[in-house]
Image (tube, rainbow, N blue to C red):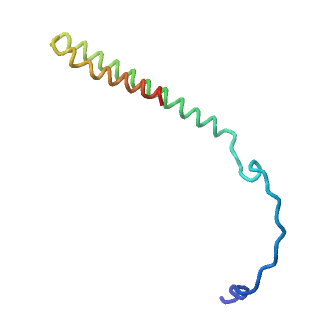
Amino acid sequence: FFSDFASCGSPRPKQAARPPTPLAQSMPIELEAPFWGFMGAAFALVFSNMGAAYGTGKSGIGISTLGVGQPELIMKSIVPVVMAGGVGIYRLLI
């Protein structure tokens, strides 16, 4: 057990300095990483705008249904359409 600690007090021999290696050789870099990063951003953009379009369509159907029964409430029900469109525009800005 104590044989591991026998060399604690003795100095270590000097090692020759190694020349610096270029970063490309010292770190393995996957060449597909930018592809997957941009694909993730594209998927986020596509699915966000698909969701905004779906929300706009569903709220438009609701407004049409409401307009048949209670036409005085149409202007109050425009808010979901504006919010769904705002989500799509916000995602385009990000």
Q: Is residue 54 above or below residue 32?
A: above
Q: Quadrant of the N terminus?
A: bottom right
For the residue pair 52 and 10, the one nearer the viewer reads as: 10
Tell me which corner region of the image, top left, top right, bottom left or bottom right, holds residue 87.
top left
Q: Is residue 2 left or right of residue 71?
A: right
- Residue 20: give x, y in percent of width and height: 79, 57
Residue at coordinates 69% horizontally, 40% vertically from top-left? 31
- Residue 2: give x, y in percent of width and height: 67, 89
Q: Is residue 26 above or below residue 3?
A: above
For the residue pair 62 and 92, the one nearer the viewer reads as: 92
- Residue 40: give x, y in percent of width and height: 54, 34
Tell me which corner region of the image, top left, top right, bottom left or bottom right, holds residue 9.
bottom right
Residue at coordinates 70% horizontally, 46% vertically from top-left? 29
Q: Is residue 4 left or right of residue 21?
A: left
Q: Is residue 26 above or below residue 32?
A: below
Work out which residue is located at the far right of the displayed protein and give it. 16
Q: How many marks?
A: 0
Q: Is residue 86 left or right of residue 43?
A: left
